[in-house]
Amino acid sequence: MKRSALVGLLLTCASGAALAAEPIPTADAAADSVDGVVVTGVRGVRRTVADSPAPIDVISSEQLTATGKTGLKEVLNTLIPSFNLPGVNGGGTSWTVRAITLRGLNGDQALFLVNGKRRHTTSLINNLARVGRGGVPVDLDLIPASAIERIEVLRDGASAQYGSDAIAGVVNIILKKDTQGGVFSYTGGQNYLGDGDTRAASLNFGRALGDEGGFLQLAINWKNNEAASRAVPSRAQYLYQPTVATVGGVTTVTPDPRDATADRYFWGASYGPGEEDIIATAYNAELPWRDLTLYSSGTLSHRSSKKVTGSFLPNLAPVTGVTAGRPLNRNSLPEVYPNGFNALRRIFELDWQTSFGARGEKAGWAWDASTTFAQDHAQLDGQNTLNATLGPDSPTYFHLSTHQFQQWTNNLDVTRAFEGVLPRPLQVSWGLEHRYERFLIEAGDEASYVVGDYVIPAGQPFAGLRPNPGLSSYAGTAPEDAGSATRHSYAAYLDVGTDLTENWYVGAAVRHERFTGDVGDTTSGKLTTRWEFLPGYALRATVSNGFRAPSLGQTVFATSTISGSLCPAAPNNIFRGGVCTPGEYLTFPTKVLRTDTAEAKALGATPLQPETSTNYSFGITAEPLPRLRLTLDAYQIDIDDRIVDTSNLDLSVTQLSSQPALAGLLSRFPQGLTATYYTNAVSTRTTGVDFVAEYGFDLGSAGRLNLNAAYAFNKTKVREVAETPAILKAVNPNLVLFDRQKISDLTVGTPREKVVLGAVWSRQTVSASLRATRYGEYTEAGTSASLDRTYSPKWVADLDIAWDVRPNTNIAIGANNLFDQYPDKIGIVNADQGTLQYGLFSPFGITGGYYYARLTQRF
């Protein structure tokens, strides 16, 4: 949205137009919810945030809106200190489904629920991410924020209560239940530099069903954001082929005139967020019928995303080669792209989930039976690119692959309070669960992965050479890399809890799960207690263990990227340890191998085993004054056999030839191989502390002021690294299964500290929110210590001001990153593209300040 459009939007709203916003208590109104009731953390009963035996955050719908963010992941990153969202974090699909961390652990080590029902994960694996690499997380951005009543974030291990993979915690998204009226809202904004325009509209509407408290709630969100880049101009000496002339022994190089007018920022378009368009819908319904309550909820979303593919090197070293899309390059065939090109990665995603269920009571037992279906279908395409090895007749648009994940979950939950067994009621809950999952990867167009025999003709730059193989973007999936897998799991749990005395609560839970395939069985347990030793002061503690089965994506995903070069003249015709024929065109792959393939097994891969965890926490809560709440919780999470991908295993031809088990690799790729595969390579320990303080002031005629402060610290260290398989050592003594860069990404790639300070002031028709967030130090590690880059802590301020111009009409203006803060410049820049000056991992992004206007109308 341009500045003139923003001004017009505000003027329209101020004049009383129909598009406007509800009075919003803004992003830090949680100080008013000290006594808010939560349903996550203790089964069978409702408790308040203050007396929960485990730490829990509650985020209201008003807080979601007042952040000015249009994506749910960005909202949670803004409001929850233990939540982290890297700004760029890699290539492939990782820029669309950005990997998150919670309490220092990957997003797929936390359990996400919607109305208490398991949310399905994405079908897009973060295979090229640095933080959260190899994870298959839940895609929160496909849930419309306008449908959400509140979000409850349980910061505690809960595998025994909700699912074996709830190691880092549980995020329960509760949908709205309004029976009448609705809200329409529109937000528009852009970065301070005038790019990254964002437009978002939302509508939710509720009506009553029947005469006994039933309801139907409908919601739709639309979001469109344009791309933004923070690259500097390309430093390439020549973008086009210069003219070289030799007269009288003097050689003169004359640049092509087009070099003087070329857009040198064009080649850095990949450095920042891409373009994205999302339509997300949701419904939530209940209908009392006889002695039952029937209910259903669901979401249906579509995303279209587009981003320039970039060459972000994992070691953050300067790029010395030539960018694929520049005109002076062997892959920019002048017959197709005379001025070069920027290849685009396209993703078209259709995602849905729906639940049906009934609740009732029988013989004193309250029961809830439900079934949930879900699917995420993603089509991966390449646009504005080519396979130059096919020559000028190459397509310029390719279907690269199709990914699909399906999940069907059936639940029975039963609970009852028994009187007279103990001095106080004993709450007994038990349940059963069945889950079916299917993951599928289909091959792309043949032209997206084959290697042709085109030779660049005379009269063109690079005449007589072959183009580099593969697409000038991410390669398509070949048939041998396609595949699918299915799995069933069966679970039963028992959860009991009681107040042994008026001030002492104890609870215990146990859960047994059985997985089909090679995963096996697991039993998870949890003990929890809370003791209020003085009025308003309490101690709480938990101990639990967890178990995360390998995701189907990690067991199925495979891909190949083909590279190529000419064999040099003798005596330098040694290629990866082997002898090649001078002038011969050599092709060699970089592969992600499935662990069940003969090639992976030959390289030491073994079937993936579950991750196991042990979780301890201890905390204190205090309410020394009315409306003042303090909580301090410490925790330790030990995870054994974490699933990660290996280092790049660079294998030489000579040594491969000595290994008969690798004959399959040699027959397909005779010039060598760089391979990785997923494996249980490391055991880690994560320790941390969470602190929250909330206080509200009544200022009389001056209004009301709510203050809060939150601090999160976590530190992950690697306790053990698996031994490098003997066969890899035999092939290449320098190979390491899990290298220092990958260890650093686990341990120092995200900030260890995060501070959120908030103040909300409101008076009659006006409210204002100011939030300051300090993101701690983090390191983007290189392949050697000299290439490490450590980024200093930064404070980022957000401001939101709202005004009721009419009883049901409100306007708001605000700014995220108010003072235009950027990460440190690291002193390394990709010379061809002008990228990487701010690195990749920044938890607050690399695009600087952003301002917006919001209008909402209640009806």
Image (cartoon, rainbow, N blue to C red):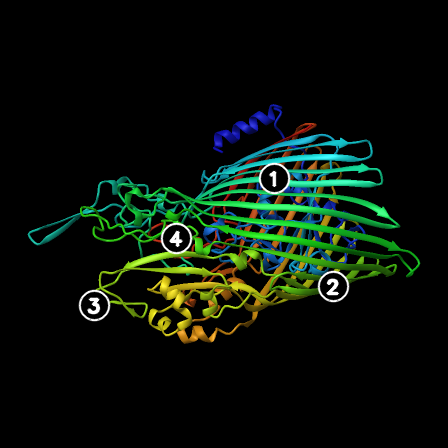
Q: Is residue 585 above or below residue 215?
A: below
Query: Where is residue 137 drawn, in percent x and y?
Result: 58, 53
Q: Which residue is mark 2?
A: 526
Q: Which mark is residue 300?
A: 1
850 with respect to 317 (left or right): right
Q: Which residue is mark 3?
A: 570
- Of pointers 3 and 4, the one earlier in the residue sequence: 4
Where residue 217 sits, quadrant-wise, is top right
* SS under mark 1: strand
Q: From where the camera sits, is residue 97 visible?
A: yes
Q: What's under tag 2, amino acid-wise?
A: Lys
Q: Which mark is residue 311?
A: 4
Q: What's under tag 3, amino acid-wise?
A: Ala
- Mark 2 vs mark 4, CA separation in Å: 46 Å
CB atoms of marks 2 and 1 within 8 Å: no
- Between tags 1 and 4, which lies in front? 1
Residue displayed at 49% across by 33% down: 1
Query: Where is residue 360 drawn, in percent x and y?
Result: 82, 45
Query: Where is residue 758 drawn, in percent x and y?
Result: 64, 48
Q: Is residue 299 above or below residue 843?
A: above
Q: What's under tag 1, amino acid-wise?
A: Leu
- Between tags 3 and 4, which lies in front? 3
- Of pointers 2 and 4, the one earlier in the residue sequence: 4
